Amino acid sequence: MAGNTFGQLFRISTFGESHGVAIGVILDGCPAQLPIDLNFIQAELDKRKPGQSKITTQRKESDMVQILSGTFEGKSTGTPIAMLIPNEDQRSKDYSHNTDVYRPSHADYTYDAKYGIRDYRGGGRSSARETAARVAAGAIAKLLLKHHGIEIFAHVSSVGKIQAPNLVGDNIEELLATREQNIVRCADPATANQMIEFIDGIRKDGDTVGGKINCIVKNCPVGLGEPVFDKLHADLGKAMLSINAVHGFEYGSGFAGSEMTGSVHNDVFLANEEGNPKTLTNFSGGIQGGISNGMEINFTVAFKPVATIMHNQQTINAAGEAAEIKGKGRHDPCVVPRAVVIVEAMAALVLADHLLRNKTSRL
């Protein structure tokens, strides 16, 4: 199986399965002497781990990360950083009904068709549990970006048709504090209460619902991204679409930009004495020609409803015969509350990679 490595200079390879002994990641390319804050890495993992609240899966995993290599006396050494996260609460028997039957909208059929073998216990490698390894590596990417003054903030901007107002304010710490005061991780408290009530109702009905996560990047310098195939927004899009259950990505004005005229959509430059040009608007989402322009980067990621529902559904078995299946086990009724930190982690990995690549772009 290819496709387990992401990035060029700041590069990760993840490994492990949902019901295996452990999952983990090897991070290569981290510059030496970066302070590695283990408490921060663990705090990031705690935002993603299961069993957090009534609107998340009740699987219990402490997700305690172990750093096996690449650090000494609290700093990176420049060698590969290996991190391991043991699995503790696997219940493979919850999937015993699924050994020969394909779950609708899961990876069961496509994996079986491609490889001729699949791990039916929670989906194996296709499980969203793999993303914990990304969060661990993304935490180190965040530490690198913070060293350069770059900040990333994401929150749940919609659940179903419930839409939060646009973010207001420049203080990332205040936005983080507000977001973490509610279990749905929406930065608007009033909307958060509506979302929680709605998700809980969906859960009680044995169903699931999708949502969106909005992410902003502040203090990103001009010049990150390459102008042809490695455009910054293209790499961000690939990163987001690699997350389980993601079905859409848009940045800046997104699809709404297709309904606008150029005279409205163009981001007019404003002169300033500091020599750091700004734009009057930011329909470009902080990226022009595939390269960051110094404005706030803004993008939104859309997640589909979780595929496992507690209803009977028609399907087929491995022989192609008609069958029926009903979801069992512990599953999220809505994935977006736990996915917020995953979106931030993947954004951080992209930006860290381009930050290092940008150092070689000119004399």
Image (cartoon, rainbow, N blue to C red):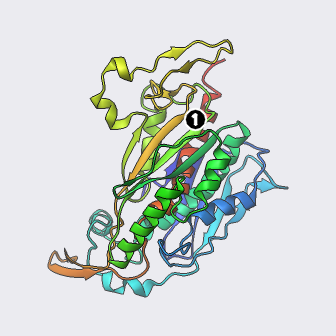
**Residue 26 in view of the camera:** no
**Residue 1 in view of the camera:** yes
The image shows residue 293, relative to residue 13, as above or below, that is above
Q: Amino acid at mark 1?
A: His
Q: Which residue is mark 1?
A: 354
At mark 1, the secondary structure is helix
Residue drawn at 53 percent across, 73 percent down: 53
In the image, 51 versus 2, the foreground residue is: 51
Residue drawn at 64 percent across, 41 percent down: 151
Residue drawn at 71 percent across, 36 percent down: 148
Q: Is residue 12 left or right of residue 303?
A: right
Relative image position of residue 80 (x, y in whole percent): 68, 52
Q: Residues within 10 Å of mark 1 (few under 14, many from 20)?
A: many
Q: On the rendered image, what quadrant is the C terminus found in? A: top right
Q: Is residue 247 left or right of residue 293?
A: left
Relative image position of residue 47 (x, y in whole percent): 59, 63
In the image, 246 versus 82, the foreground residue is: 246
